[in-house]
Image (spheres, helix red, strand yellow):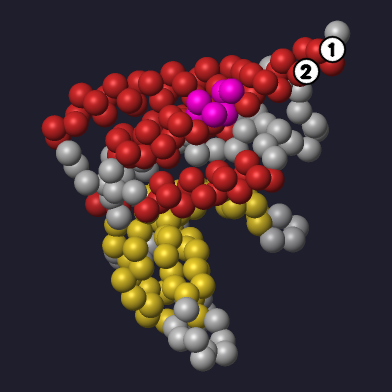
């Protein structure tokens, strides 16, 4: 991919074991996401930067580290299985409906003032359905179905530390998957669990009100 001023790659370094006798930790760049800088607002100190994740990438090689890390990346996208197109369409519809149902429950839940916004799921769904920027390299852009399959992987109101940890693990699984239908099934399972969790919290909340 050619260098562009309004894009960068965010990646996670995973610790790896080279040998039992190694005294220093070694790391590998496992997950990468191509990020688009949408807006930069200059502040008195620093800047407020709005970014948008665009798609998964694999770092082919590092080229330099000064003044910042640079390298070559290639897109990672799901395999296209035309035989499962009807199943894919059906699961996408189910996912979108389930996300809306979950969000309808979530906004009824009383949350502390410092809690995350209760619209993360809907915002994620809207982002997935947004048209990509005109200047974006299409070879790096996932399909609409692939983008939607990631949209449910958001925290919900009142999530415990264990639930957030579980969500992180599910996100990593989703990043590894190359089958959109498989990821949709993972997302639907998570949505169903979250609906049950929110419904239980709402039941407790109604008892407290009484």
Q: Nearer the viewer, residue 68 or 61?
A: 61
Residue on which disc 2 sits:
205
- Local crowd at mark 2 within 10 Å, few (<14), some, or many (≥20)? some
- Local crowd at mark 1 within 10 Å, few (<14), some, or many (≥20)? few
Question: In the rendered image, which quarter contains the C terminus?
Answer: top right
> Looking at the picture, how far across and down is residue 102, in whole percent?
55, 22
Magenta segment's dominant SS is helix
Tell me whether circle 2 and circle 1 mark residues in contact (CB < 8 Å): yes
Residue at the (48%, 61%) spot, across then down = 10
Q: Is residue 1 above or below residue 128?
A: below
- Residue 112 part of the magenta-drawn span: no
Taking the image as shown, residue 188 lies to the left or right of residue 73, namely right
Residue on which disc 1 sits:
209
Q: What stretch of residues is rendered in magenta?
A: 191-196
The quarter holding residue 47 reads bottom right
Q: Is residue 184 above or below residue 59?
A: above
Q: Please, which residue is most extreme toward the left here?
A: 83
Residue at the (45%, 31%) spot, across then down = 189
Q: Is residue 150 above or below residue 121?
A: below
Q: Is residue 192 above or below residue 66?
A: above
Residue at the (50%, 29%) spot, across then down = 191
Q: Nearer the viewer, residue 70 or 31?
A: 31
């Amino acid at each position: 991919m050619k260098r562009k001023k309004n894009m960068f790659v965010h990646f996670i370094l995973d610790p790896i074991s080279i040998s039992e006798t190694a005294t220093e930790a070694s790391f590998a760049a496992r997950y990468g996401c191509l990020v688009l800088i949408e807006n930069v607002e200059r502040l008195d100190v620093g800047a407020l930067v709005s970014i948008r994740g665009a798609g998964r990438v694999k770092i082919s090689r590092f080229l330099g580290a000064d003044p910042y890390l640079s390298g070559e990346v290639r897109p990672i996208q799901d395999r296209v299985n035309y035989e499962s197109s009807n199943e894919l369409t059906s699961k996408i519809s189910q996912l979108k409906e389930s996300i809306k149902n979950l969000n309808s429950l979530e906004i009824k839940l009383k949350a502390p003032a410092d809690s995350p916004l209760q619209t993360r799921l809907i915002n994620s769904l809207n982002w997935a359905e947004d048209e990509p920027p005109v200047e974006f390299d299409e070879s790096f852009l996932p399909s609409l179905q692939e983008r939607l399959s990631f949209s449910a992987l958001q925290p919900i109101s009142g999530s415990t530390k264990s639930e957030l940890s579980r969500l992180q693990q599910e996100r990593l699984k989703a990043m590894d998957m190359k089958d959109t239908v498989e990821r949709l099934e993972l997302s639907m399972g998570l949505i169903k669990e979250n609906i049950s969790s929110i419904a239980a919290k709402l039941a407790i909340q109604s008892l407290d009100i009484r």
